[in-house]
Image (tube, rainbow, N blue to C red):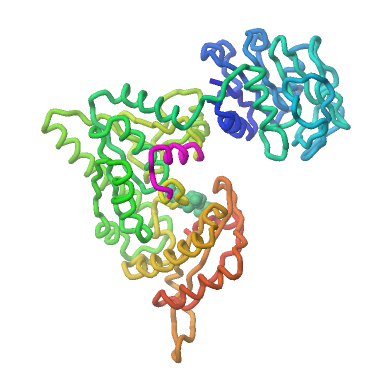
């Protein structure tokens, strides 16, 4: 494992991902972890991340210099570079020479383990106030910029390296090469962490954890739970039962996709609970968004618990024990909930609709160490169809929060038809990978006058909400081609009954959220 020590900036996850893109497994640890504990994990290399502080600020996170004497290859980035410089006897000063954004870096020292084979001048991404003015003794200065004389240094013998810039950011043109040079040449690692090896490793781990007992998995129709289930199925097959609660609020064809494509590609044992009636009855007359969400969450738990109890009883009747619950928790959730150190007991995650917290099951979380793009790769490796692996995010409460107003069967039908047209056209235009998601919203409480054929209509508007985003925390509206918008609008007003107007939501997030409710 390569450990990425997180000094509190937003960069640690990105660094960990870039290391994995180099096919080397990495994990994030907090900078407060004692060095002895880091070393106990037998890391093959350590990377110190950037951070928001000045190394001289009061309470600034530090690093025990013992780390540099342990014989483990270390790469310091930005703040990590400055920490390294000060810890090893170099000088970091508050020169007032701030650098922020794109900067030209000149490679000065040759030969250089990190920079060999990259251009003498290259664009890098900088973000710092303090600057290193003298490298520690025994270190070669390998790069400089107009304002910073020591922008990188290395000591090959001790296998210690540092750069002032952020190689993990795409704006650093040769950043990935610099990271790979550290990993392959500096630390002598080989790129062996592949999707195949992840599957193998997880299958072994799941078998060891579950043994001869049985496990349940709640499928939501989303990528994460599908891949988690497929992985566990590969490991323990018959011992796994998946439960899919059909709340009647899915998009056209989605429940069928889970029933057919998922089962066909994995051979998973699936129980589909058709609870549409129950959800619709509970939602009758409700138009408040928060109330809708609460009702759906509550009903989901009840239905799932009932299915679970039946399975447990069934297994009990033949003398078996159902002891495990499979969840599609991802690495960012683990890191963000402070569990990055591998401690257990994180709370039940919301991605299957908020499971009860007093579970009497042990969790199986085979995706706990993976980023989203890696989950997709694993899904492909396991033979899941592209429609599942590349599915856009879809909210747990489903179409209920895309109908502004009360939810009825009729309104759901209308929205499903409009949504299917939008998805079809976006796919035909080859835009599925360019947009993050495109909610289609029915303003069921609004009517406007139109004219169709020779007659007056008084129908509902449909809102298109295409957005681009990296993490759904912020988003911008996607500039879809006018021709495509025209085609969508034409088709919806012609093919979907009761809709006589199509509008485009051109609000970023913030201030608008992605979903309307
Ligand atoms: P908002 O509307 O908050 O949505 O900008 C951000 C992202 O989260 C999705 N979303 C949900 N996902 N359960 C989910 O699993 C939910 O209750 C839920 N609400 C919103 C939304 O589709 C977007 O990707």
User: Whole-percent x and y of residue 140?
Assistant: 81, 16
| Residue 313 sits above or below residue 435 on the image | above
| Residue 220 sits above or below residue 276 on the image | above
| Residue 502 sits above or below residue 193 on the image | below
Looking at the image, residue 323 sits to the left or right of residue 341; the answer is left
> Is residue 376 within the magenta segment?
yes
User: Whole-percent x and y of residue 355?
Assistant: 34, 41
**Picture quadrant of residue 22:** top right
How many marks can you see? 0
Residue in the foreground of this view, choosing between 171 and 52:
171
| Residue 18 sits above or below residue 282 on the image | above
What residue is shown at x 23% (from left), y 27% (from top)?
Answer: 213
What residue is shown at x 43% (from left), y 68% (from top)?
Answer: 418
Asked whether the viewer can see residue 516, the reply is no
> Is residue 119 within the magenta segment?
no
What residue is shown at x 58% (from left), y 46% (from top)?
Answer: 470
Q: Secondary structure of the magenta portion, mostly?
A: helix
Looking at the image, residue 65 sits to the left or right of residue 297; the answer is right
User: Whole-percent x and y of residue 500?
Assistant: 47, 78
Residue in the foreground of this view, choosing between 472 and 55:
472
What's the magenta region? 373-386
Most distant residue in the left direction: 317
User: Whole-percent x and y of residue 106?
Assistant: 83, 30
Asked whether the viewer can see residue 190, the reply is yes
Most distant residue in the bottom direction: 454
């Amino acid at each position: 494992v390569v450990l990425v020590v997180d000094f509190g900036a937003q960069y640690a996850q990105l660094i960990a991902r870039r290391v994995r893109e180099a096919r080397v497994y990495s994990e994030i640890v907090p900078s407060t972890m004692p060095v002895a504990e880091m070393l106990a994990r037998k890391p093959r290399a350590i990377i110190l991340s950037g951070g928001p502080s000045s190394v001289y600020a009061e309470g600034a996170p530090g690093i025990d210099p013992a780390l540099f004497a342990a014989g483990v290859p270390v790469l310091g980035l930005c703040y990590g570079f400055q920490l390294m410089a000060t810890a090893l006897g170099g000088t970091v000063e508050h020169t007032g020479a701030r650098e922020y954004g794109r900067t030209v870096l000149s490679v000065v020292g040759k030969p250089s383990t990190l920079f060999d084979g990259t251009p003498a001048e290259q664009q890098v991404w900088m973000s710092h106030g303090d600057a290193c003015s003298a490298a520690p003794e025994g270190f070669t200065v390998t790069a400089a910029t107009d304002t910073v004389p020591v922008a990188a240094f290395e000591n090959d013998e001790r296998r210690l390296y540092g750069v002032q810039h952020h190689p993990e950011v795409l704006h650093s043109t040769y950043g990935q090469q610099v990271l790979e040079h550290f990993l392959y040449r500096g630390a002598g690692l080989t790129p062996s962490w592949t999707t195949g090896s992840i599957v193998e490793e997880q299958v072994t781990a799941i078998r060891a954890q579950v043994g001869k007992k049985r496990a349940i998995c709640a499928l939501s129709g989303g990528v994460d739970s599908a891949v988690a289930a497929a992985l566990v199925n590969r490991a323990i097959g018959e011992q796994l039962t998946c439960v899919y609660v059909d709340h009647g609020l899915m998009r056209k064809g989605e429940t069928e996709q889970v029933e057919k494509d998922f089962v066909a590609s994995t051979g998973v044992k699936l129980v589909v609970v058709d609870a549409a009636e129950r959800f619709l009855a509970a939602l009758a007359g409700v138009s408040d968004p928060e109330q809708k969400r609460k009702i759906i969450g509550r009903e989901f738990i009840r239905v799932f618990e009932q299915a679970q109890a039946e399975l447990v009883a069934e297994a009990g009747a033949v003398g078996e024990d159902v002891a495990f619950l499979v969840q599609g928790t991802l690495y960012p959730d683990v890191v963000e909930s402070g569990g990055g150190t591998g401690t257990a007991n994180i709370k039940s995650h919301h991605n299957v609709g908020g499971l009860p917290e007093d579970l009497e099951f042990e969790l199986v979380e085979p995706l706990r160490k993976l980023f989203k793009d890696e989950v997709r790769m694993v899904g492909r490796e396991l033979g899941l169809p592209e429609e599942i692996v590349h599915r856009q995010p879809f909210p747990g409460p489903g179409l209920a929060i895309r109908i502004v107003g009360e939810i009825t069967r009729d309104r759901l039908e209308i929205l499903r038809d409009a949504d299917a047209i939008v998805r079809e056209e976006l796919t035909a235009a080859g835009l599925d990978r360019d947009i993050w998601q495109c909610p289609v919203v029915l303003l069921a409480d609004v009517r406007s006058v139109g004219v169709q054929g020779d007659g007056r209509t008084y129908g509902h508007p449909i809102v298109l909400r295409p957005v681009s985003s990296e993490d759904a925390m912020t988003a911008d509206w996607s500039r879809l081609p006018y021709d495509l918008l025209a085609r969508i609008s034409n088709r919806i007003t012609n093919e979907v009954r009761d809709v006589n107007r199509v509008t485009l939501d051109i609000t970023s997030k913030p201030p608008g959220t992605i979903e309307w409710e």
